[in-house]
Amino acid sequence: MDTFDSVKEEAVKAVEEAKDLSGLQEARITWLGKKGKIQGLMAEMKNLPKEEKPAFGQKVNGLKKTVSELIEERQKVLQAEALKQRLQSEKIDITLDGEKMERGTIHPLIMIQQELEDLFIGMGYKVAEGPEVEQDYYNFELANLPKDHPARDMQDTFYIDPSTLLRTHTTAIQMRELEKAHGQLPIKLICPGKVYRRDDDDATHSHQFMQCEGLVVGEHITLADLKGTLEFMANAMFGEGRKVRFRPSYFPFTEPSVEVDVSCPFCNGKGCSVCKGSGWIEILGAGMVHPHVLEMNGFDPKKCSGFAFGVGLERVAMLKYGIDDIRNFYTDDIRFLKNFDRFD
Ligand code: PHE
């Protein structure tokens, strides 16, 4: 009986003192397991007189029940504690600021390029590309600028070797496309891309800039087609109601050649500081493809004609977004670029 009482006492103490669920599980095994201490009491029975055995057996079973009830109760308490602890340790502080995802933006020049591409693809043009490291042949010769032609000075060139250069205009792409067409009509394309000239960089000059040139060759293509096309483009880029005007100019690859002005989108042609009071802003060079250029590229100028134009993308972007320094496009200042985040 002494053994019984001390086992009972110890068991109760062990259950009460179990600190956590795994400690409790240990106590369960120690006291209630098949080889546990309470089961061990049964072994004592054989030393008892026969008549005491049933009563002792009942007591042991009663003890089993009591201990397992105690364990169950203790388990509930410990489970509740464990849950509370977990909730506390996994607590999310919803008052903390979220981490802002930094997203890149489309460069304003690429935005203008994409706008022009959409516009001209909509009119059935294709978009052509070419190499930035170009042969003198495509950049100059085929564009009616033979060696020693004085007009080569118009475009100060970065030469890599005497016959290789950084293209000075995307007209080089036009020449490649004309040659590739083998006299096949019609041709209708735009060619956007980077170009390079030996300029000293300042607010309005950059040794690297972007152009988008257009070329159409077919039967009965006239200066009126060029004007209509450019007027359409000016309206799309600078808003409805733009007018264009042509002024005589000179390019070796076009004849006649024109300088093209757009009626000022800021004052609607009345005259303001942007257009310096004239009501017009010069935006591009254009003209009818020179018959000699057609000939050199395998087209018969008696059977076909064409127009070409070339616009500087920086100039368009500067006018459209009111940017006053061309260097902004090339200094990668995140504060500048953020202005063009279309999702902000
Ligand atoms: N290539 C000329 C330039 O870079 C622009 C131009 C293109 C002019 C096509 C006329 C025709 O200045």
Image: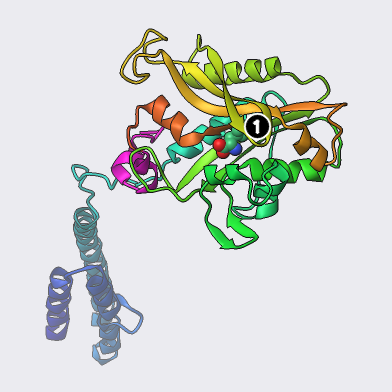
Report the quarter where the C terminus lies: top left
Secondary structure beneath label 1: strand
The residue segment tinted magenta is: 326-344
Residue on which the image places disc 1: 214
Kindly identify the residue that appears in the image at 75 percent across and 27 percent down: 306
Q: Position of residue 149 (x, y in %)?
A: 63, 46
Q: Quadrant of residue 100?
A: top left
Q: Give 184 or 99, whichever is nearer the viewer.
A: 184
157 above or below 51?
A: above
Q: How many marks?
A: 1
Report the quarter where the N terminus lies: bottom left
Residue 299 is left or right of residue 140, and the answer is right
Q: Position of residue 42 (x, y in %)?
A: 29, 83
Residue 334 colored in magenta in the image: yes
Cβ of disc 1 within 8 Å of ligand 1?
Answer: yes
- Residue 66 visible? The answer is yes
Residue 210 colored in magenta in the image: no
